[in-house]
Amino acid sequence: MCGILGYHGRPDPQTFERALERLTPRGPDGSGTWRDERITLGHRRLAILDTSERGDQPLEILDRYVIAYNGEIYNFEEIRAELEPEGIVFRSDSDTEVLLHAFAKWGPACLDRLNGMWALGIWDRREHKLFLSRDRFGKKPLFYARAGDAFVFASEMKALFPFLPDVRPSDEFDWCKTHLNDYESTDRCLIAGIRRFPAGHYGWLREGELTLTRYWDTMDSLVDVPSRYEDQVERFRELFLDACKLRMRSDVPIGTALSGGLDSSAVACSMARIGNHERDRRMSSDWQHAFVATFPGTHFDERRHAEKVVEHTGIRAEYLPIDPVAGIESLPDYLWGFEELHLTSPIPMVETYKAVRRHGVVVTLDGHGADECLAGYGQEVFKAFRDAGLSLGRVRDILAVYRGMIDIDSPQMPKTRYDLGYYVRYMGGKKAWAKFALDCLLGRQERESIPDRRFGQFSGHLYTLFHQTVLPTLLRNYDRYAMMNGVEIRMPFMDHRLVSFVFSLPWTSKLREGYTKRIVRDALDPIMPPEVTWRTSKIGFNTPIVDWMKGPWKSFVLDVVHSTAFAQSGLVDATEVRQMVTDVIEKPDASYMEGERAWAALMPHLWETSVLRREFESRARTAAAG
């Protein structure tokens, strides 16, 4: 895991090194630069596999190919075993060298063999062309820009800033700030002149022209699944445990960020099952670490659930009370590192991975991706009503799933009876339901989108969450939270084999008998504590934003919204946002959603002061230094 930078052209060496230095948090263990008359490649290293200098980058082989690469190829041992009979002699034990030889042998087709995450650039010295690629789901970031006649790419936007004539909000900024969960899956960026390389694609840069090719689409990668649910459960268990086993390969200590929810607990328990009973030549022997963020005295504290997992597995746990005061003091630095707009505060997550690194752990296996492909979000389950057709038994099951997820007694929950009457109202009322029933009987249900037509409405909606809205944003966020602290996150639920399998399942394998993610629960029940496996309530890793805005952050947010800089900001409606913030602070019953909306509305100004202003100050210092 690392930070990469490339400049196709002839950059000023000092400017290039200054830009590369901005990626140091992603790669604190070393720096390397390779250049010829046509291109310069730079790399900041986070050493994980083969921590010796043999694993350094940029790496050149065969006097032809040079790579700068960010990510991890988990099945590199298996690919290496394919290549060695061809007479290839490896000089290191790194995945980087395996990846580059795989590209030399198979070209872009090598991507189909990779199980991992990556953003990379490979320079072909013979053909004078640049190959770029990003992993299937966009776990690793990659941006690019034009600098005059030159083409520049990097892991983060801030590494491109030094090559731009000016750094200012893009024409798409207003759209992005109102579509916080949508823009990450597009090429739209906050900074003018910068574009995001798309997930699941590769590209060739020839004579200054970039051409893109899509190599992965989950809809084209579906698989046959067993018809019996019990056999589906068995296959899910096999795939998930193997995904965890591959991701435990490391030459440095690994651990997990544990919340006590189903997904992170599934990962922690699987790590314990594998670590205690199986061996792999490259599996880390130092894996028994869990890190639990806590919010004492708030509804968001899940420590008691995490303790069940710690007791069950016997792993060592560090409980991390999140200090909102210390976090707010560091917020400008966090937002500079984050460099994007954020729906809520990044402080708890950044503080968690800071503690991970402080305790000597460099890699975590975390539970991201399960909610979006296996149905873990509240009212999203109601999307299954249309798939249930005229089966009232299935409709009742969907309602039971939702009732189990929410805290009905919470004062912030609407007093709603989630019964068949609610179902009819959700479907648009009696007349709309009657039309729906007739359409079901006549077999003429309409599907609005391609995913809906392919999967049905519920799984089609999950496809959108996974590929286009919530998950791409979450992946970006967690890459930044961890990498600004020099920590790599691996995600077993996002193994592409498992993703293909899950999207090939019927929706009834996900919502079943009063539970979300039923197949996960049944598959891993033998290795998990039952109090966690069969827990239905869901909290999620969220910031207690209202409590903090009313308490330890009150003076900070009020100072911001009453400042001259805020009043003069061109990125927010100062009067409107000031009122939103004031309402959250003053209303005794302000909801989490109100707090989240107020913080999101404040974010463009915080981004402006933490990112744009810091860049302006950096340019001024550089100019003054001559």
Image (cartoon, helix red, strand yellow):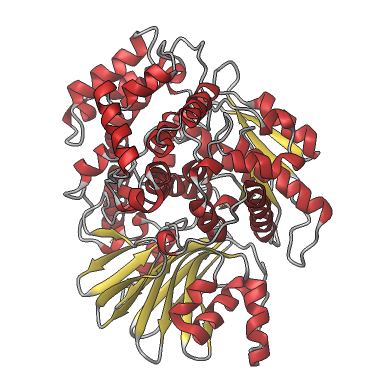
Name which residue lies at 32% across and 27% down. 427
- Residue farthest along the top direction in this orientation: 588
Name which residue lies at 81% across and 38% down. 314
Left or right: where does residue 127 sit relative to residue 2?
A: left
Left or right: where does residue 79 sit relative to residue 201?
A: right
Q: Is 197 above or below relative to 109?
A: above
Task: Name the image quarter holding residue 336.
Answer: top left
Estimate the x, y position of residue 328 in percent, counting from the top left. 45, 29
Left or right: where does residue 507 sit relative to residue 353?
A: left
- Residue farthest along the front direction in this orientation: 442
Q: Is 393 above or below relative to 471?
A: above
Quadrant placement of the C terminus: bottom left
Q: Is 201 above or below relative to 189?
A: below
Task: Name the image quarter holding residue 457.
Answer: top left
Quadrant placement of the N terminus: bottom right
Q: Nearer the viewer, residue 469 or 325?
A: 469
Estimate the x, y position of residue 447 in percent, counting from the top left. 29, 46
Estimate the x, y position of residue 367 in percent, counting from the top left. 58, 44
Estimate the x, y position of residue 158 in percent, counting from the top left. 35, 55
Q: Nearer the viewer, residue 230 or 142?
A: 230
Q: Nearer the viewer, residue 527 or 70?
A: 527
Name which residue lies at 34% across and 62% down. 197
In this view of the protein, can residue 94 be seen by the observer? no
Q: Is 422 above or below relative to 360?
A: above
Task: Give the mark count.
Answer: 0
Left or right: where does residue 188 sit relative to residue 546?
A: left
